[in-house]
Image (spheres, rainbow, N blue to C red):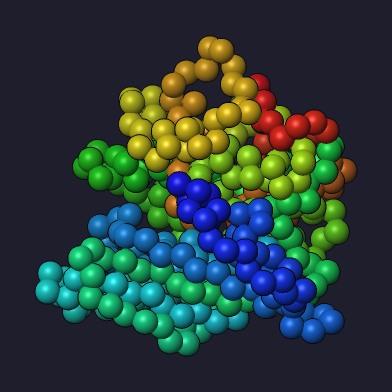
Amino acid sequence: MLRELLATLPAPPPDAALLVGTETADDAAVYRLDDQRAMVATTDFFMPVVDDPFDFGRIAATNALSDVYAVGARPVLALAIVGMPVDKIPPEVIARVMAGGAEACKAAGVPIAGGHSIDTLEPIYGLAAIGLVDLDNIKRNAGALPGDSLILGKALGVGFLSAAMKNGDLSAAGYAAMIDSTTRLNDIGIDLGGRADVHAMTDVSGFGLLGHLSEVCQGSGVAAELDLAALPTLPPAIELARAGVNTGAAGRNRTAFGEGVKLPPDLPDWQDNLLYDPQTSGGLLVACEAAAAAEILALFKAGGYADAAIVGHCLAGPPTITVA
């Protein structure tokens, strides 16, 4: 639907300084400032995905900052986006949401320099984030090359955990796993931006792994193969998925991105759903030279991304994905 809506808008006037716009559904806009640096701008906000207001603020802010890291940039400031039904939610609860967002930004070394608030029917929180990046360090979701290895920085399954929480079926261990994953900053993207052997980068969020990998393949003009056995998955999510927990968004992702995806004929439904499972504040998906994959994976591990894994590779051909 979004693609159809955007197609109805008039094309923006040409601007040589706009290095990354809407052409390939990239993670953030990138605008050249001078001969060395560019500004990165993005925004993201959503309604609560957990009941705890502080955790909600942390997750939403971490998720918004991720789009800056995904293009290899360092965030430098953020503006808070706050929408709250002030006649239904006590001020102290709203304050906890904002405190959670501030805590995530503090961990990222980013000041919240202002923002905007509005009285809404449902709670909304997020950030508009601004970053800076050297021109040579800009990474896009287009740029993957045949032969590249694919590395995923975080385990999948957050959508399953979120669905179980909404149904009241999420264990304390499952909740802890979800919070640990969704509040982990993707700040390794700053270091990856400085590597010439990293050719493309994006973060896996609402479109699920196959949705975001499809965008990489489309933008880069390559095909991809995923190793199903190598995909990292949060253990509590596997149990829930096997029990039939799923999200409506997974089905929408399958409809939007399923064309051109080849799955094993005997693939269990829960694994099919996992591939399309929407990830809130998911991990970075990196396409890099195969010879550098082990070294880059070691960087992930050293940075605290314990579940990071090499999950597949790119190859020449039309932008299709094969899962084996």
72 left or right of 160?
Answer: right
Front residue of 143 and 154: 143
Residue 244 in which image quadrant: top left
Q: Where residue 7 sits in the image (x, y, percent)?
A: 55, 53
Q: Where residue 40 sits in the image (x, y, percent)?
A: 64, 73
Front residue of 23 and 7: 7
Q: Residue furthest top?
A: 266
Q: Residue at x 33, y 31 (%)?
A: 245
Front residue of 300 and 91: 91
Image quarter (top left, top right, bottom left or bottom right) of the C terminus: top right
Q: Residue at x 75, y 32 (%)?
A: 318
The reply to whether residue 294 is visible in this rendering is no
Q: Residue at x 38, y 75 (%)?
A: 81
283 left or right of 133?
Answer: left
Residue 41 in which image quadrant: bottom right
Q: Residue at x 50, y 37 (%)?
A: 256
Front residue of 44 and 160: 44
